[in-house]
Amino acid sequence: MSTAVASSSRAAPRWASRIGRWAQAWVGVIAILAFLELIVRVGIIPSRYFPPMTTTFGTLFEQLGQSSFWTAVLQTLQGWALGLGIAALIGIPLGMLIGANMLVYRGLRPIIEFLRPIPSVALIPLAILIYGTGMQSKVFLAAFASTWPLLIQSIYGVRDLDPVQRETAQSFRIPLKDRLLKVSLPGAIPYIATGLRISSATALVLAVTAELVIGAPGLGRSINTARAGGVPDLMYALTIATGLLGWLLNVALSKVEARALHWHPSHREVAR
Amino acid sequence: MSRRWMYAAVEIAVPVAVFAVIWVWSAGSDVYYYPPLQDVLNTFKDTWLFERVGSDVGPSMLRLFIGYFLAVVVGVAGGVALGMSPLLRRIAAPVVEFLRAIPAPALLPFALLVLGVGNNSKIFVIAFVCLWPILLNAIDGVASVDPTLVDTGRVYRIPARDRLRSVVLPAAAPQIFAGMRTSLSLALILMVISEMVASSNGIGYFVLQSQRSFAIPEMWSGIILLGILGYLFNAVFLLLERRALAWHRGARAGSQ
């Protein structure tokens, strides 16, 4: 069946197939929303726990006009940005230095392998003790968690450099600093870009977690407050808003990556 | 050869040195938050060997594995269905992209409200977060199976069920395993978070409770336990993966 659809859309004009694809993308979303609306209206799920989607989206639009909502969004984004920024400043240079030297790499590998799987959330109590329950804890947790993907991707990126490139640079006695900046870094950038995308999602998760668990101000705390206050439609509206925020950050980073790496072979196919 | 020995020696010597430095450095420590390593290890022995294994580690592990198992079943089944049909894939893509982007802890209040504070809400959140890496990798893996393989199966009139079991799934297996490994560490993280928010037992509960009652060595012992668990999970999974995919790595090495 699927092949029939594909061949018919190939025969149709370009704009028609584009509209077709667009419609297909929305069919799923609308079907699920309608289904959720229906099961609540019919009474399969009590609306006390799960308000109808129309109510939830109404609340969401109402929130969009309120300054307290945007303050919470900005607070969450601030934690995300600072955490990711610190992680990039630590993870990328450190990863490149470790990856550039075999001896250092072998010495530190067991330590990294041991520290990496420690769930960063295990450090929440420590963060509360040292940084309190505000922005600092949130940034610390987001930075700690999102450093690892960047560190490891940077190490792999440097290690995966074409040996011909590396040896050419070495035999021309290019100083270490230039070798790192002009040979290793461009070679490692696709890896680092992937690391950035993973780290961005991680940083957002940890920012929301910190707000939820230790009550740092932001979307996570608003969600928990709405739950505790017995306002389910607000809780769902904010949860959807958090999802949209995560999705927007994903899309934005992918776009930036595609644009910044258009010269790289891995992106040439996509760019066409 | 001597170079290889040197690397091996470094790999053992550096961690030992780091451990020794922390031991000596923290021995005389009177900073409240960083108790001597010796105290922490003693507390670790008293707490986790095997005093609280039944009351905290057991329930934690149970939730983790049920949630993870559900995610594997749903993720592989859904991934195969979506991977085989481009139409379904296009319809489901926006929903998947949105659900995947929700930071999982933000769903915890929802889970608590609908499923209550018991095991179910924690299992739901663990399964939810583990689902996406497995699902996306399974979709990718199934969709990118070499068409020659599938067509050959078709030409020989191999029944669809056998084709799925002996051609599509093995070809997609390496990617599915990669997703499962990512999910395993996510499962541990969400286990801890869910136990910190509303719970009366579990490792996450213990660590947060220790901090709140200022039992600092206990808190550190819990953090160390979580690190050891994460390391062990990863190591055991790698071992299983290497076994399950032995044919794959062998085939690749042979063709080179």
Image (cartoon, grey):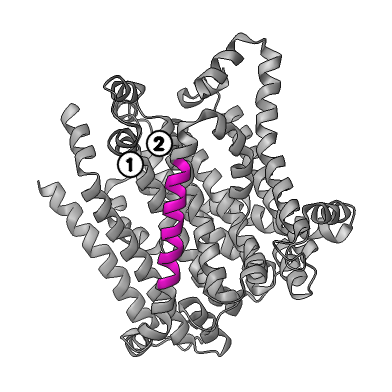
| In-front residue for pair B222/B187 | B187
Going by the numbered disc 1, the residue's amino acid type is: Ala
Residue visible at 43% across and 79% down in the picture: B222
Residue bearing mark 2: B141
Q: Position of residue B209 (x, y in %)?
A: 54, 85
Q: Position of residue A29 (x, y in %)?
A: 68, 41
Q: Mark 1, chain letter?
A: B
Local secondary structure at mark 2? helix
* Magenta stretch prevailing secondary structure: helix
The answer to if B185 sits in the magenta stretch is no
Q: Mark 2, chain letter?
A: B
> Disc 2 or 1, which lies upstream in sequence?
2
> In whole angstroms, how far apart are the C-alphas of marks 2 and 1?
7 Å
Disc 2: CA contacts within 10 A as few (<14), some (14-19) or many (>=20) = many
Q: Position of residue A86 (x, y in %)?
A: 58, 55
Left or right, B79 with respect to B174, comes to right
Going by the numbered disc 2, the residue's amino acid type is: Gly
Residue visible at 43% across and 77% down in the picture: B59
- Residue A81 drawn above or below residue A128: above
Specify the quadrant of the image occupied by residue B84.
top left
The stretch in magenta equals: B62-79
Q: Which mark is residue B173?
A: 1
Q: How many marks?
A: 2
Specify the quadrant of the image occupied by residue B146.
top left
| In-front residue for pair B143/A50 | A50
Residue visible at 23% across and 38% down in the picture: B248
| In-front residue for pair A185/B53 | B53
Left or right, A80 with respect to A61, comes to left
Cβ atoms at labels 2 and 1 below 8 Å apart: yes
Local secondary structure at mark 1? helix
